[in-house]
Image (spheres, rainbow, N blue to C red):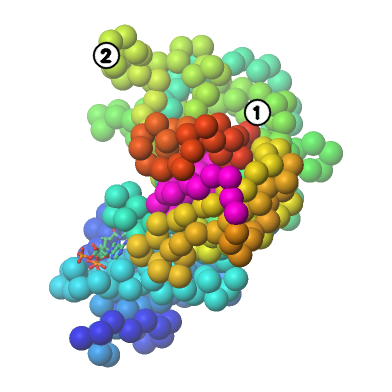
């Protein structure tokens, strides 16, 4: 029987919630109350016109679903719509019947129709989605910091708790941060709601001349089952517009040392060991031969180019490393046939334009997953070449291609979905 995909009508929401409950047992959707809470949240979230729930049907039966998001991404300072997908879930009884494959295919086509050239997700298993053409973004680090190892910043005079009337100013701060950081997605309404409506979320802001210049949002986490007085701080988001803001927010964290054994900081910034007095993360692990464990790391957000030509047209004003040459880029895309194939790119002093074909200086072949990582700057071309993940018609051009896609900063993403 074929899978068909459509928006999930309200009458099918309960079935979708059951599917989600089984797919994500950690959500703890057990009682009628839990289901009702989830239902209310889904109805609330889908009031945002940029968010939608789609279901996969076999006949009239809903067997799986997903949530899609229109995100506004800062891609090298160019604002572009990127499709996001989350909450992918397939009924336990209907696994391995291509329900997920068809959902993802629908999702990609949906965002092609909306005019996007890229999509993103957080994988339940990175290899599963890499096969579908998604490439790894910048890795996520988990630092465990003892508060007293943070720099003693002195002043905390600009800090206060977030207040109910701060919605506009915190959004403005978040938007300015978005504008300055490659990779960021613009904050959405439900994310803003989180700061104000979630009783567990504590947010401290830095205010200067009636403007919020940064904020630290965190939750507490029991550190010890036997001792309820010991709690860790888990950072949910740290945003700072300049180093003065960072210094004060760190000073705030530092003075929590009497009650807080560790600050857990998930971040794509992998330089935090320079910031703290003792770079070790408290595990005392020695990595052979002699490496003191500073943090653990994981693959998080993944990106996928869904229209190679279009993404270069979007990046027409981007500076591709000042290079001048003709590159034939051959993308291997086994999942999305209309994106499989070659494009000839003309680079003039770093400005790219797409050509129908014709002569070229060098041809580069790679999978769309690794190309997506290369384009956003989470991997460099030399590494792909060294690992044998790309072919090049003339090895003398490895440096040229590497310089074309070199980035100053890897993409960062504060949005989870
Ligand atoms: C993960 C989950 C969604 C998988 O769903 P599923 O419907 O069983 O998966 P599918 O049958 O669609 O499997 C994917 C298919 O796409 C195919 N596929 C992947 N890449 C492909 C490519 N490049 N070209 C062609 N086919 C491809 C795979 O081969 C696979 O088919 P196969 O099993 O015949 O090999 C489901 O197990 C689930 O609900 N898990 C729990 C919740 C969860 O973790 N969700 C993910 C959060 S992001």
| Frontmost residue, 316 versus 217 | 316
Q: Nearer the viewer, mark 1 or mark 2?
A: 2
The image shows residue 163 at horizontal and vertical percentages of: 67, 48
Badge 2: residue crowd in 10 Å (few <14, some 14–19, many ≥20): few
Residue 55 in sight here: yes
Whichever of labels 1 and 2 marks the residue nearer the N terminus, that label is 1
Q: Residue furthest left?
A: 93
Residue 392 vs residue 401, the one in the foreground: 392
Ligand 1 rendered quadrant: bottom left
Q: What residue span does the magenta drawing correspond to?
A: 359-378
Q: What label sits on residue 288 in the rendered view?
A: 2
Given contact means CB atoms under 8 Å apart, are the residues at marks 1 and 2 in contact? no
User: Which residue reaches farthest bottom?
Assistant: 60
Alpha carbon separation for disc pair 1 and 2: 34 Å
Residue shown at the point (25%, 84%) measured from the top left: 2
Q: Is residue 364 magenta?
A: yes
Residue 261 screen position, x and y as percent:
40, 22
Q: Position of residue 236 (x, y in %)?
A: 50, 42
Report whether 248 appears left or right of 266: right
- Provide the residue designation for mark 1: 246
392 shown above or below 250: below
Instruction: Looking at the picture, tell me which residue is in the foreground, 101 or 348.
Output: 348
Instruction: Kindly state the secondary structure of the residue where label 1 is placed.
Output: helix
């Amino acid at each position: 029987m074929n899978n068909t995909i459509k928006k999930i009508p309200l009458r099918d929401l309960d079935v979708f919630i059951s599917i989600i409950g089984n797919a994500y047992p950690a959500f703890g959707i057990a009682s009628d109350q839990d289901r009702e809470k989830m239902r209310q949240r889904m109805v609330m979230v889908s009031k945002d016109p940029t968010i939608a729930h789609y279901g996969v049907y076999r006949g009239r039966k809903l067997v799986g679903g997903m949530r899609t998001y229109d995100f506004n991404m800062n891609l090298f300072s160019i604002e572009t719509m990127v499709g996001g997908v989350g909450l992918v879930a397939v009924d336990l009884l209907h696994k391995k019947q291509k329900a997920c494959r068809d959902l993802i295919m629908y999702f990609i086509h949906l965002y092609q129709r909306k005019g996007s050239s890229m999509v993103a997700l957080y994988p339940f298993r990175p290899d599963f989605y890499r096969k579908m053409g998604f490439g790894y973004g910048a890795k996520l680090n988990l630092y465990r910091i003892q508060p007293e190892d943070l720099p003693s910043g002195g002043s905390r005079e600009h800090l206060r708790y977030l207040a109910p009337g701060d919605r506009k100013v915190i959004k403005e701060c978040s938007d300015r941060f978005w504008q300055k950081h490659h990779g960021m997605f613009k904050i959405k309404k439900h994310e803003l709601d989180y700061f104000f409506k979630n009783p567990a979320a504590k947010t401290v802001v830095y205010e200067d001349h009636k403007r919020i210049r940064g904020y630290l949002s965190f939750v507490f986490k029991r550190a010890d089952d036997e001792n309820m007085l010991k709690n860790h701080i888990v950072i949910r988001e740290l945003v700072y517009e300049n180093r003065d803001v960072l210094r004060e927010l760190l000073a705030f964290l530092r003075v929590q040392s009497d009650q807080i054994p560790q600050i857990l900081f998930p971040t794509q910034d992998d330089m935090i060991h320079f910031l703290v007095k003792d770079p070790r993360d408290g595990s005392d692990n020695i990595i052979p031969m002699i490496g003191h464990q500073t943090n653990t790391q994981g693959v998080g957000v993944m990106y996928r180019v869904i229209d190679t030509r279009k993404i270069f047209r979007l990046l027409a004003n981007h500076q591709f490393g000042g290079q001048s040459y003709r590159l034939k880029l051959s993308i291997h895309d086994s999942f999305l046939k209309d994106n499989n194939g070659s494009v000839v790119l003309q680079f003039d002093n770093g400005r790219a334009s797409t050509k129908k074909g014709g002569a070229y200086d060098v041809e580069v072949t790679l999978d769309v997953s690794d190309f997506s990582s290369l384009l956003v700057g989470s991997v460099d071309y030399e590494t792909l070449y060294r690992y044998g993940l790309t072919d090049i018609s003339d090895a003398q051009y490895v440096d040229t291609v590497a310089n074309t896609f070199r980035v100053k900063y890897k993409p960062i993403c504060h949005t989870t979905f």
